[in-house]
Image (cartoon, grey):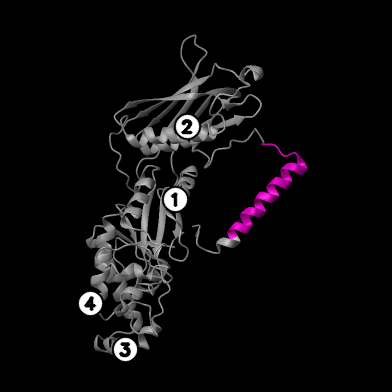
Amino acid sequence: MLHLSEKPHFIYTCLMLLAWVSQYVSLSTGFELNHSLTYIWPLPHELTSGNETLTVNPTLSLYLIGKGGNFKILREGFRRYKRIIFKQSSGVSIFKNLRRIRSIYDISQIRIIVNSDSDELKLGVDESYTLFITKTGGKSIAWEAIIEVNTVYGALRGLETFSQLCAYDYTTKSVQLSKAPWYIKDKPRFAYRGLLLDTSRHYFPVDVIKSIIDSMSYAKLNVLHWHIIDKQSFPLEIPKYPKLWNGAYTKWERYTVEDASKIVRFAKTRGIHVMAEVDVPGHAESWGVGYPDLWPSNSCREPLDVTKNFTFDLISGIFSDIRKIFPFELFHLGGDEVNIGCWNNTPHVKQWLKDNNMKPKDAYKYFVLKAQEIAISKNWTPVNWEETFNAFAGSLNPQTVVHN
């Protein structure tokens, strides 16, 4: 798992250093691509290739057939990848005739065959695809590109691979596709391929989150684990409890319900799920900025107060509101790094523990299991960090996904 929130300046420095090193190596050694290798990421399950170089028409068109041929998500995906493929060759050069840039192209159309009429995005949805780049039948010397899939999400993965096969040639000023003919049969090795983004410790504007989602699609990742809320800030609007986002860093560093919904819809068009995380009972100090009764005391601001019905009513309200935003079946409840000693040092919590014949570790289990019950009642499958499994594996709901 890659955690984007940790030490962003360090990451930025490393990236800049890598860029400088790669530039230095390129300039000092005359580095060139090894054309015997296949530059497709991730490497497909099965592939064969040839040794011909083709040109791709800048007016590349899409021909959709099959049960799923009318989906907007696929037409938008094609237009998006077309912009990526022809980013450097849009428009007509005034030097076209002088450079003898070819006007006859080998590939002018992509044909996509979609066998399913459903665009439901669930964990384990069929993302497989078969990509053919081959000569057309008969005496024609033309080539054709065909992607055959069961779902639109397989088609998006196939378009990503097709885009990676295309490269701009600076001599001919055209997009070329090398090593044809191609036969690629691909499917995911893992149903869950995730990236964690923490917007509590470090706020990311909506457009930046969309850029991250775009970058995920280029690597065929399919789950954005959105760690929205934590100790440091509570940036998400919760209509049932409108004071919660008083815990945001500033009023400008917030996500409205509409913002979050836009992110989820944007991700779906890339075949990406969004799994929200609301970490309880620890990592929740920011909740009490708007509702101080959630804090056991001013000196014990997390874990949340386990003794009050209000705590669990509020959690249920949060889950009800965000369930309308996040359709993905997995929901992350956190449950890690809980300072249970804080409860034992708070008089009214200590008394509650005594009255209920509990130790702090028992209250920790009680809280996690109660949060799980609430999540399951909203038709979610609960996900918890491994501390919960290490502490009371036998008590976790059997549906629980343990995140290691």
Could you give the CA–CA distance between mark 1 and mark 4, rounded to whole angstroms?
38 Å
The amino acid type of the residue labelled 1 equals Asp
Residue 183: x %, y % from top left: 50, 28
State the image coordinates of residue 348 (x, y, percent, origin top left).
29, 88
| Horizontal arrangement in the rendering, residue 319 relative to residue 345 (left or right) | left
Amino acid found under the numbered disc labelled 3: Lys
Identify the residue under disc 2: 82
Front-lying residue, 204 or 18: 204
Tell me the element at label 2: helix
Q: Comparing marks 2 and 1, which lies closer to the viewer?
A: 1
Q: Can residue 379 be seen in this view?
A: yes
> Is 95 located above or below residue 350 in the figure?
above
Residue 309 image label: 4
Q: Main secondary structure of the magenta part?
A: helix
In this view, the mark in front (2 or 3): 2
Please tell me how crowded label 1 is: few (under 14), some (14-19), or many (20+) other residues with Cα within 10 Å.
few
> Mark 3 = which residue?
350
**Magenta-highlighted residues:** 11-33
The amino acid pointed to by label 2 is Lys
Q: How crowded is mark 2: few (under 14 residues within 10 Å), some or many (20 or more)?
A: some
Amino acid type for the residue under numbered disc 4:
Asn
Question: In x, y percent, where is residue 172?
Answer: 63, 24
What numbered label is drawn on residue 75?
A: none
Q: Which residue lies furthest to the top in this view?
A: 139
Residue 150: which quarter of the image? top left
Report the mark closest to the observer, 4 or 2.
2
Q: Distance between the residues labelled 3 and 1?
A: 46 Å
